[in-house]
Structures are given as C-alpha cells and as structure tokens.
Image: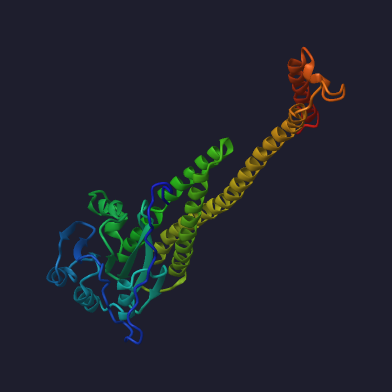
Amino acid sequence: MAKAETVGKRAPLKTRRPPVGASPGTLIADPSARRSELRLTLISPEKFETIENASIDDLNTHCDSWPVIWLDCTGLANIPLIEEIGRIFSLHPLALEDVVNTGQRPKVDFFEDHAFVVVRMIDDVTAHRYEQIAVFFGKNFVITFQEREGDPFNPVRKRIESSMPNRLRSRGADYLAYALIDAIVDSYFPPIEAAGEQVDSIEDQMLNMPHKHQMRQLHELRRDANVLKGVLWPMRDALATMIRNDVSYVKAETKIFLNDTLDHSLRLIELVETQRDMLTGLIEMHLSLSQARTNDVISYLTIVSVIFMPLTFLVGVWGMNFDPDSSPWNMPELKSQYGYPASLLFMALVAVGLVAFFKWKKWL
C-alpha cells in the first residue's frame, strides 16, 4: 500500500504474451527484462554452501551431490539460460512460458516429479509495483525466478546459514519451498497494516475538517485494496490446492506448515476486506460531510441575505428624492433633527429582531 500524496503513475499488472499462433511453450523475453544472474545455495543437515554468480557448470557439478539445492535466478532476459535450467531439471515448457510471461495469476500446477507455483509480492510499495515470483520444487531442488533484485527471502537465507539445528537444513525441498512462499505471504502484512493506520489517520482528520485531498487519498487506498484483493484471493486458492493435492514430493508434515501459511493469507484477505469496507464508508462520509458543509454555507448566506433584505428596502425608501416642502406627506422624516440616527437604530432593531427570530426557530 502507498502514500497517496506522493505517488505518481503506478505500474500496472501486465502480462506479456507470445505472438498469436505461437507454439505452446514458446519463451520470449520482455525487452525490459533484467539481466539474468544465478545464486546457487547447496544445503545439507551438516553444512551449506552458497555460490554467487553461479553458472550452468556449477549447477551440473553440484546438483546431484547435495540433498537439497536452491537455485535463485534474478532477471528473465537470458532465455537460453532459462531453457537450459528447464532441461537440467526437466521442467515443463508451459510452466517456463509462464515464468517469462510475467503478470500471471497466482496459481499452482503439479507435474509428475515437480510442482510449479506462481506468487506475487509487493516489489515497491511507493510505486505500487508488484513482482511475479515463480517457484519450482521437486524431491531435492527448489528453483525461484524473480523479475529483479530484492525479495523477502533474507530471513530464510539467515536460517539456512545459522549453525543451530533448524528445519530448513534437515527437511527436504518441499519445506524450503514452503518457507519461501511463507516469507512472501508474510511480507504483505507491514504494508497492509501501514495502510490501515493511514485509513485511521484520514478518518480522524475528516471528523475534524474534511479536505479535498482526503478524497484523492481514499480513492488511491481503495484502488490499492482492490489490487491486493485480486492478488490475495488466488494466492489463497493456490495454497489450498497445495494442501489438498497428494503428491509424493510434498510431505504430510509440510502440509501442516502450509496450512499455517493459508491461515496467514486468510488473515490478510480479512484485513483488506475490512479496509475496503472502511474506505467505502469514509468516501461516503466525506461526500456527506462536504455536502453538509456546503449546505451550512448556503444557509448562512441565505440568513445574511434575509437580514439585509428589509434593511435594503428601508434604505431604498429613505433614499428616494422627495421634497418635504411641497407637501407634508412627501417624506417628512427627511427634516427630522434625529432622523439619521433614528433610521440607523430602527434598522439595527430590525436586524437584531430577525437574528432573534432565527435563533428561536433554531435556524442558527
């Protein structure tokens, strides 16, 4: 979620598709895709090893000698590299096509010896930019594909590097995949909670004094909530599918932890739905307060006009050019010694009387 006053144009969720009529599984890189870099993490219960800027040769050397390997590919510009990774691990070509065609709906697909999971994370809160992360995992490997640098996986990496006994080193690839997906799901909590605090702040400001910029903030936040809803609901469905499916490379004990992640996704959905309802109510309240304020202004202007109408009438009557010398009925007040202060006093009494009448009627 974002600060509505400082954001510019947001990055829409776009899906790059292959040309119409192209063969299924055709991989075409986005011209704006980042350069591909590999990070290889080798994991066993006793030790681990991380190879930065890894190559295909490193992958071929170590992929069969460690209990679990995690290959993280950042950037999707190198199509031959992605195809070679797919060949080494026998990844389904349709899944690889979804990897490079970013903007996919969160989902999970099960194949004979591996699963393919698509999730989305908030890449840049201020710019409203989301990033697709594709996760493949099988019996002894996990492969993640990211569009660009920056991810919520640092806690997972620290747990792998920890010398203390931990599940990430002693359990299989399915548990590592769960940990990565769980990190992505939990990364939604801070921005959603920050948006909730912003909604509460706007509500307090509106109760004191509504302003035009608050309406823009509310619409920005509601649009963010709608986007989050479109991401979180299919993510929940994907997690539920992972729990229900019975495949050999997803252990029963891992499904227990996946069920906890599913609970987190449901909690996120509840938060977003609550915020959407609050934002809808605040938008309606802002419109009502603005209309009420306009009505108050019109009422005050009307009262002022009503007060001055008889005064204007009196001034107009006394301002006519009558000659009291020609007839005693031609405005004799014009020659009165105290005519001017008497007329001002009379008009003041009329104005005070009208104000008192309005207060008695509770119009003021």
Residue closer to the observer: 55 or 204: 204
Q: Quadrant of the C terminus?
A: top right
Q: Which picture quadrant has residue 43? A: bottom left
Residue 132: image x %, image y %? 34, 65
Q: Which picture quadrant has residue 207? A: top right
Q: Up-down: is 55 above or below 361?
A: below
- From this viewpoint, which residue is outermost toward the right? 328
**Is 257 situated left or right of 302 in this image?**
left
| Colouring chosen for the image of the structure | rainbow
- From this viewpoint, which residue is outermost toward the front? 326
Residue closer to the observer: 176 or 252: 176
Q: What's the residue at 60%, 44% (across, down)?
A: 290
Residue closer to the observer: 269 or 129: 129
Can residue 364 be seen in the rendering of this structure? no
Can residue 159 be seen in the rendering of this structure? yes
How many marks the image carries: the answer is 0
Residue 297: image x %, image y %? 64, 38
Residue 328: image x %, image y %? 87, 21
Residue closer to the observer: 339 or 24: 339
Q: Which picture quadrant has residue 336? A: top right
Q: What's the residue at 25%, 71% (across, down)?
A: 31
Residue 172: image x %, image y %? 30, 64
